[in-house]
């Protein structure tokens, strides 16, 4: 018997207030973790280059508890951006649900490869992506030469 999910995932516009709140929380957490606000190589994602943005909501309260986005890199490849789950919802499957929603959207858009960058001070993210089938790759794009960046990739399908 499958138990009902404690959360739902919705596609939202990049400028959605819940999404903004989650991205601000992520930024504050990363600033604290790295001890600086200068921890993102390259151009931050924007409304003009994010093609998919999803938000996870607590099923009981509708509070936003996680998000993730896709930015096109080339006709076959997209980059996962702004994957974040609030601390109280970690370990509940929300991150996996968000990742599956992004993978499904990518496949639907015809992308066959997903890439991402995470930081050296984020061992939980490193373990999560490796567990989910993403393998380490050399730094790509704006992450080349960044001492804080670790890059991963997964072929879909």
Image (spheres, rainbow, N blue to C red):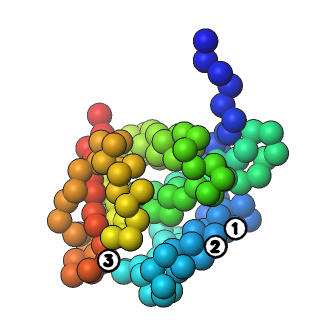
What residue does disc 3 label? 148
Q: Earlier in the sequence, mark 1 or mark 3?
A: 1
Local secondary structure at mark 2:
helix
Q: Do the residues bearing badges 2 and 1 touch, measured as CB atoms within 8 Å?
A: yes
Choose between 157 and 131: the one closer to the eye.
Answer: 131
Choose between 82 and 27: the one closer to the eye.
Answer: 27
Q: Residues within 10 Å of mark 3 (few under 14, many from 20)?
A: some
Locate residue 87, reporting x and y percent: 61, 57
Q: Is residue 138 left or right of residue 97?
A: left
Q: Is residue 40 left or right of residue 6?
A: left
Q: Is residue 38 left or right of residue 78?
A: right
What residue does disc 1 label? 21
The quadrant in which the C terminus is found is top left
Local secondary structure at mark 3:
loop
Q: Is residue 24 left or right of residue 49?
A: right
Viewer-nearest of discs 3 and 2:
3
What residue does disc 2 label? 24
Local secondary structure at mark 1:
helix
Q: Earlier in the sequence, mark 3 or mark 2?
A: 2
């Amino acid at each position: 018997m499958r138990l009902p999910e404690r959360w739902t995932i919705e596609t939202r516009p990049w400028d959605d207030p819940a999404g903004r709140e989650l991205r601000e929380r992520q930024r504050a957490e990363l600033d604290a973790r790295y001890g600086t606000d200068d921890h993102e190589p390259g151009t931050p994602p924007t409304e003009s280059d994010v093609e998919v943005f999803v938000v996870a909501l607590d099923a009981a309260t509708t509070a936003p508890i996680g998000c993730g986005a896709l930015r096109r890199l080339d006709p076959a490849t997209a980059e996962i951006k702004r994957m974040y789950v609030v601390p109280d919802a970690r370990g509940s499957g929300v991150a996996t649900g968000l990742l599956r929603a992004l993978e499904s959207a990518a496949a639907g858009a015809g992308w066959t490869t997903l890439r991402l960058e995470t930081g050296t001070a984020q061992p939980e993210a490193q373990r999560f992506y490796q567990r989910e089938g993403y393998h380490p790759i050399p730094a790509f794009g704006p992450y080349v030469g960044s001492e804080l960046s670790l890059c991963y990739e997964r072929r879909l399908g």
